[in-house]
Amino acid sequence: MSKELNENDKRKRNNLLSQYYGITEEKDVENLFDVDGKHFNADAYVDKLVQETSLKQLIDKEQELVREIQSLDSEMQTLVYENYNKFILATDTIRQMKSDFKTMEDEMEKLVQDMSHIATFANNISSNLQDRRQQITKLSNIHELLKNLQFLFDLPNKLKTCVEENNYSLAVKYYAKSEQVLQDFGDHPSFSGIQSDCKEIVETLRKCLKVQFSRAEVTSQELEESASLLCKLGESSTDLAREFLEINKVRLEKDLEDLSSYVWSGENNGEVVLIFIEKCCNTALNNVALTIATFNNIFPSTILKHNEGMNSMATDVINQLCPIVESKIVEIIGFEISEACCLSVVAALDKFHRRLLAVQRLLLVDKQWSFTLITEIARIISYRSANALVIKWTSELQGWRDSWNNDNQPHGSVKFIEGALVEHIHRAFVALTAFVGNHVTFSQDSQFRQTFGRRYVREEVLVLSLRKLSTMLANLSNVTGKDSASPTLILVLSRVAIDFSQNLAQSLLSLIEEQFDIPVGFQGDHLTPISVITLDFKQTSQSLLQSYVQSESHVLVQMIRKSMDSRDWLTASEPRSVRPVIKRVLEEISRVDSHAAQLYEEGSRKERSSDSSRRTHHSSSRMQQKSSWSSLGPSQLDSSLLNNIQKLFSERIDLSGTVEPNKGSVVMAIIKICLKGFLECVRLKTFGKYGIQQIQVDCYYLQLFLWRFTFDENLVHSLLDEILSSAVQRCLEPVLMEPGVVELICER
């Protein structure tokens, strides 16, 4: 019966747990065979296994169940042991708590008893002293009164002692403590003498405080103490405020005079700037801040008039201080702005900026003193950096011009010169980046960064310097005489100008935009477009190329002219070889071609005939025909008309045209001027038979070798034909040599 009750109780508990955890009963028949289910039927489960499985499967199932039962038994034992251990620990804890509470209850009972004894003892004392309380209070009041009277009797001596010892604050404290009593009982005979003595001493004290208040060497702490004590003695706050402002104005003006007359020594300009700013912050700015703080501590803000006077005085001092700081820094740094100098100047300006902001917060004003000062100094440094850059470039160009060796390889010289020019720019940029460092307080202002980066660094340093560089290079092409630059240097500089036009200027501009936070391609604030700079360098390159062509061609023409003037062409001997000057001309043209090939591309060529020497036979035969024409009469050929036609075609050759930046155009321009000069020299001479034959040999030799340097062979042939034609016209006996003989002489 008890077993059935236990099972019913267990079933009820299981139902309650199932309801609590939301487990619903499943009525499926399959739950009868679920070993872990609560509706499991062992007999039905065994019958099912016997019917559906073989003997081997039954044995395996039995072994599986045995293992599960053993595992469950093991887990149950572990759980029982663990719970038992916890139960033991809980029992010990409860036992300990009971013991502790017992001790605490005993102590509380003892404390209650002690408090009861104390209350009883206090009541006994109170009841015993009740009758004497009024007497004790009366005696205490009498003692306090006597003590105060004794203080009043001793007050004159105490005040005098404090004044003699310069302990003004204690004297004011004593007097303030007894002032009301003396005023109330001053008419009493016993106190009138004390009051009069105190007034005399206090008047002396007031004079001492005023002397200390107006002393020039007084510290801010002493000044504040004097003003505070005078106010406690009844001085007018308005008068003290006015006198305070006058005294401090004189002190601050003295600080400004000292800063204005500051003299420094040493070579490190950056360190001098730091020392000067340190002095400025520790004197003028520090005294302004102390004056404002002292004024605000001493005088109430209700004196609006004097508050305005304080702000006005401080504003005037700062307005005078900023120009002094600017002029001194500009004077100290000089015109050579190094990276170290820039770093020191920026550090000094940043310190000055922070101290000035602190003063502004005390004044409660929103001014741009520091930014105006810093922006102006940044502008001056940028301008001087640009000037220093131009001076360095000028010195470099002067050095290259004076020490240039024509044996220098043009290609390597271009890289060297470009590297030197760009290196100076990079150094200037590195120095100026100090103004926009992340650790610099004033550089966080976006307006300053925009103004400094765009207007000063980009425009005044980079753009202005590059345009001046372009002008300097262009001016080299205009210098003549002994101060003129080497033609090879002019050619190299023309390549440098082309490189600046094509990529270097753009690269430098991109570098500036990246380092100084200028938007890429930004054209606001009237910024100079890159196209203006590239156009300047392109025009400079063109000017230098023109100068190079003129210089080289002038040398060649002078060589030809001197050789023509040094010979008597009427009595010249029969030609046996090409004149040396013609070979020298070809050597110089070959040198020019080699130099130009190192710096410029080939350029476009016109289609050349398959055999250039064939024109010589044609020219020779044509000139031979002309020699026979000269023996005919006027009725058969008008030689004057023929000369005019030849001159007309000759004048169509443009000698002053634009020289393109390629090797062919440069060399061709020099050849044209050289041959044109040869032609003019021929037109000024009169030739004999052998004289014209020498010209024929020279022209043929030129034709043999000039074709490899030109991209317009027809033009060269035309000029050579014109030279020979002019020689025929100026010849008294125009008999030309046979082509075979000319070829033999030239090949030999």
Image (cartoon, helix red, strand yellow):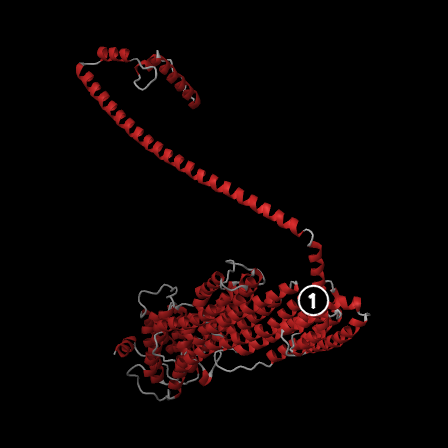
Q: Position of residue 397 (x, y in %)?
A: 44, 78
Q: Quadrant of the C terminus?
A: bottom left
Q: Amino acid at mark 1?
A: Lys
- Give the answer, above or below, for where 132 lies relative to 165: above
Q: Nearer the viewer, residue 726 or 232?
A: 232
Q: Is residue 419 visible?
A: yes
Q: Nearer the viewer, residue 652 or 572?
A: 652
Q: Nearer the viewer, residue 451 or 118?
A: 118
Q: Is residue 64 left or right of residue 620?
A: left
Residue positioned most to the left: 56
Q: Position of residue 647 (x, y in %)?
A: 46, 75
Q: Quadrant of the N terminus?
A: top left
- Give the answer, above or below, for where 175 lies relative to 111: below
Q: Residue 48, located in which quarter of the rendered image? A: top left
Q: How many marks?
A: 1
Q: Is residue 672 visible?
A: no
Per the image, the residue denoted by label 1 is: 147
Q: Residue 77, located in which quarter of the rendered image? A: top left
